Image (tube, helix red, strand yellow):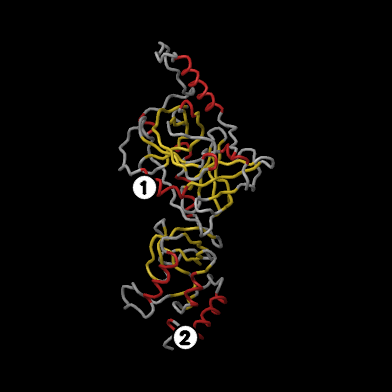
Amino acid sequence: MQVKEFKMKYKMNKFHILLIIAIIMFSFSSCERKSGRKTNSRPIKTYSKKEPVTKKQSGIGEPQSARLPLNQLFKKYQSAVFMVFTSDGLLDYQGSGFFISADGVAVCNYHVFEGTTKGMEIIKTANGQELKVERVLAQSTEDDFIIFKVRLNSKVQFTPIPIAQRNPEIGEDVFAIGNPRGLENTLSKGIVSGYRDNGNLIQTTTEITHGSSGGPLLNMQGEVVGITTAGVGEANLNFAVNIKLLNLNRYLSQYTKNYQPGHSYIAHVKRVIDGDTFVIETDERVRLIGIDTPETVHPRRDVEPFGPEATEFTKNAIEGKYVRLEFDVEIYDMFKRLLAYVYVDDVLLNEQLLLEGLAVISTYPPNVKYVERFLEQQKIAQKRGIGIWSNI
């Protein structure tokens, strides 16, 4: 999509953000003489009519976990930040967004999407994949955020950004990753310089410019504390929506384990146990459905021929990668393992193990969706006399 000079729509839905900026700008001009000598004017309060947030209410001042070097944090989480392209049919716009879960739950500013044509949005990931929004989970014009599910493919590679459980203190270091004016994966650093709107807005010296709207503001533990929203560069005034407003944990728990029969889900493979079993990022075990590979880790059996080869084949294919899990009728077995057809890109791993002679068919109704297809692949391996069929 061609973006006209990466022009970012900055029609803010949250009018009081602009009001806050205007008030603070006015206070700068009226309270600071050209000589730099300050007047006796009192600071202007910018809270709303609500009671101000106290440290106890907001979590400010709670103990921090270990800080990490900025370069390491950037390297780890830049893959979770993406570009958002939208259009109203006449003009094209560009913003930023970020993933908070491995299965594609994402966050952005609402104003990036407001007034644009549904279905014309493009999510461009850090590794160049162009994706679509699958569904909107929640949105707020007042607080300027939108939470949505992105339809992932197995070529997408990213580390989701964890959510901070406390607000950063004033003076604490923070940083942002965004795409200002289309310049992908740009890093900027600053401090938290204040809280506005009863704590709903984080004021920061971290530079936020057009095209960065919707990106993450992170603490030095690599946790997202806000959604970058607006900035006045010459005054070093920048704002981010406090991430606590979004109550994101409810969406994470809902969409990481709410599996449905016949549906597909993207998962990150944490560890391969053997040829037909592995662990995903949610610490759930997944069993390849419809096949059985020779045993290597069974507590009451010896290592079976071609078991190590099957394990190595599966490790090389999926360990540390994103895969697509497709469910049949029954999702779990008696051991509470997920039963899935597993795709790497468009290749079905269950089928490939059969084709390489590293597995045999093992189907149990009602999960028989690909039984005929699997039988054909097993016949090919038998005819070739490879793997477990080599000594028969």
Q: Is disc 2 placed on a helix, strand or loop? A: loop
Q: Residue at x 41, y 63 (%)?
A: 319
State how many labels appear: 2
Residue assigned mark 1: 72
Q: What element carries label 1?
A: helix
Q: Quadrant of the C terminus?
A: bottom left
Lower position in the chain sequence, tag 1 or tag 2: 1
Q: What residue type is labelled 1?
A: Gln
Residue at x 47%, y 36% (from the top left corner): 245
Q: How far across and how far down the image is residue 67, in percent?
A: 32, 42
Above or below, 277 against 361 in this view is above
Look at the picture and state if 291 lies above or below 8.
Answer: below
Q: List x then y, in percent, for residue 239.
A: 47, 31
Q: Pointer 1: residues within 10 angstroms few (<14), some, or many (20+)?
A: few
Q: Which residue lies furthest to the right in this view?
A: 90
Depth order, front residue of 103/366? 103
At horizontal 55% and vertical 60% (from top left) the residue drawn is: 263
User: x, y percentage for residue 276?
Assistant: 43, 70
Look at mark 2 in the image and give the residue it sits on. 385
Instruction: Say whether residue 63 is left or right of residue 162.
Output: left
Q: Position of residue 46 (x, y in %)?
A: 47, 22
> Badge 2: how crowded within 10 Å, few (<14), some, or many (20+)?
some
The kind of residue on which mark 2 rests is Gly
